[in-house]
């Protein structure tokens, strides 16, 4: 058989240099939504090389500054969606940005928005099956001040499609929409209600909405367990692989299993909890197959739970950082084998990368990126 052109080149390389180049490894990046270390400078999206074997692995290759100062970079989407757009919010300013990732190494700003449909200060963004984004707005402008927020569907270009109706007066003003999970199979959206302004220090409400028309159906509270306080500060709902089962974390380190979401009597049961650490919160989780990953400050760690029986989660591994570290945000790579972690206290300027085995649930340390030039919060992996 005649060698191909590549084969011929390789034979020449063998003859002259004693070897052949390996095919290039596809580039992998982290996008870290970062507050400027100097408040007089612009906040920015940092592009970090995380390609195994790259000469620049762990380095910030590019930054994209955004308009304004002290925006308070907070949440990004938790994973890069198909289509090459990434939503992030600056919670302090109430401004959000959409980045165009068509060139993964050099993103650009595609859109910017603030209030929408009367709602203000979006906190979290979730992709819908149609490719649009469902945004959780914390507040709504009203004649008597700020009211509970709601939901808005937004195109990838940052344009409003529709918004939920105002919440009834019976809903407490500090019941602010925080984060959510979409269940298309049940025509439901589950949202949490922690108030980012701190007006309600004991929020324990969940809200259930109909996805098809964004109508609010139920507002109900989480009950505490034996330790007490586990249901406070509802945080992040996550949908299991069946598309119907939802686990909800609380910042008070409780984990709740939701039931009967398509009925008139939705309920929640406490199935696990972790110790609390003063002035810190259990925070961002992710579900990877039969495993639930979550940051637990009391352990200064990321913990993996086996949730094959979601009524009885079981710890299978953890990775601990320094005792002064407060891990907060995590996100998982598209191949489910890497985890990025950012946090507070002594880890507020750095990014941690972990390895994860989706077959066994085992976590291990990978790489530390010691300083990205500011304070990163929402951080997400590129798509292949």
Image (cartoon, rainbow, N blue to C red):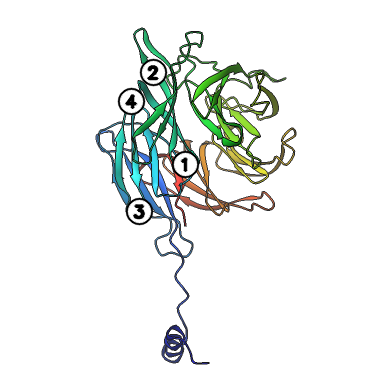
Q: Earlier in the sequence, mark 2 or mark 1?
A: 1
Is tag 1's residue or tag 3's residue first in the polypeptide sequence?
3
Give me the C-alpha separation between circle 2 and circle 1. 26 Å
Secondary structure under tag 3 reads loop
Where residue 129 appears, as percent x and y from the top left, is 50, 41
x and y, in percent, of residue 118 in the image: 35, 20
* 171 vs 154, nearest the viewer: 154
Q: How crowded is mark 2: few (under 14 residues within 10 Å), some or many (20 or more)?
A: many
Earlier sequence position, callout 3 versus callout 4: 3
Between residues 93 and 115, which one lies in front from this camera angle? 115
Q: Distance between the residues labelled 2 and 4?
A: 9 Å
Q: Name the residue under label 3.
A: 102
Element type at marker 4?
loop
Q: Can residue 371 be seen in this view?
A: no
Q: Earlier in the sequence, mark 4 or mark 1?
A: 4
> Which x, y percent locates residue 40?
24, 34
Per the model, the C-alpha gap separating discs 4 and 1 is: 23 Å
Judged left or right of residue 47, residue 363 is right
Callouts 4 and 1 close, C-beta under 8 Å: no
Question: How busy is the neighbourhood of tag 4: few (under 14 within 10 Å), some, or many (20 plus)?
Answer: some
Residue 166: quarter of image: top left
Circle 3 Cα neighbour tier, 10 Å, few/some/many (<14 / 14–19 / ≥20): few
Q: Which residue carries the number 2 mark?
A: 140
Instruction: Examine the rendered structure and indicate whether residue 116 appears above or below residue 301.
Output: above
Report if residue 224 is visible in the image. yes
Crowding around mark 1 (Cα neighbors within 10 Å: few <14, some 14 to 19, many 20+) is few
Report x, y in % for residue 112. 30, 36
At 60% from the left edge and 17% from the top edge, which residue is drawn? Answer: 220
What residue is pinned by disc 1?
130
Label whose residue precedes the other's in the sequence (3 or 2): 3
Give the label, 2 or 1, closer to the camera: 1
Which residue in the protein does label 4 denote? Answer: 115
């Amino acid at each position: 058989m005649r060698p191909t052109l590549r084969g011929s080149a390789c034979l020449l390389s063998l003859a002259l240099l004693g070897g052949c180049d390996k095919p290039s490894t596809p580039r992998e990046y982290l996008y870290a939504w970062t507050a400027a270390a100097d408040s007089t400078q612009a906040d920015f999206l940092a592009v970090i090389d995380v390609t195994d074997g790259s000469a620049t692995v762990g380095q910030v290759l590019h930054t994209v500054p955004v308009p304004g100062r002290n925006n308070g970079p907070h949440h990004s989407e938790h994973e890069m969606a198909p289509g090459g757009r990434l939503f992030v919010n600056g919670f302090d300013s109430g401004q959000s940005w959409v980045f165009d990732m068509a060139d993964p190494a050099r993103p650009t700003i595609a859109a910017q928005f603030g209030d929408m449909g009367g709602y203000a200060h979006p906190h979290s963004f979730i992709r819908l099956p149609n490719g649009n984004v469902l945004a959780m707005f914390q507040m709504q402008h009203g004649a008597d001040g700020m009211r509970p927020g709601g939901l808005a569907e937004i195109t990838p270009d940052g344009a409003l499609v529709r918004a939920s109706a105002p919440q009834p007066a019976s809903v407490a003003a500090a019941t602010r929409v925080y984060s959510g999970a979409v269940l298309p199979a049940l025509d439901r959206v589950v949202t949490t209600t922690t108030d980012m302004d701190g007006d309600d220090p004991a929020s324990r409400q969940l809200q259930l909405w109909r996805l098809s028309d964004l109508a609010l159906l139920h507002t109900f509270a989480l009950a505490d367990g034996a330790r007490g306080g586990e249901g406070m500060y509802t945080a992040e709902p996550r949908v299991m692989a069946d598309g119907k089962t939802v686990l909800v974390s609380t910042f008070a380190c409780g984990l709740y299993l939701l039931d009967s979401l398509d009925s008139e009597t939705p309920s929640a049961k406490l199935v696990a909890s972790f110790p609390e650490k003063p002035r810190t919160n259990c925070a961002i989780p992710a579900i990877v197959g039969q495993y639930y990953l979550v940051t637990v400050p009391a352990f200064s760690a990321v913990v993996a739970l086996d949730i094959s029986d979601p009524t009885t989660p079981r710890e299978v591994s953890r990775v601990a950082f320094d005792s002064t570290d407060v891990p907060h945000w995590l996100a998982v790579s598209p191949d489910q084998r890497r985890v990025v972690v950012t946090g507070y206290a002594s880890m507020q300027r750095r990014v941690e990368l972990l390895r994860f085995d989706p077959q066994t649930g085992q976590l291990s340390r990978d790489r530390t990126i010691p300083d990205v030039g500011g304070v990163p919060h929402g951080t997400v992996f590129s798509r292949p």
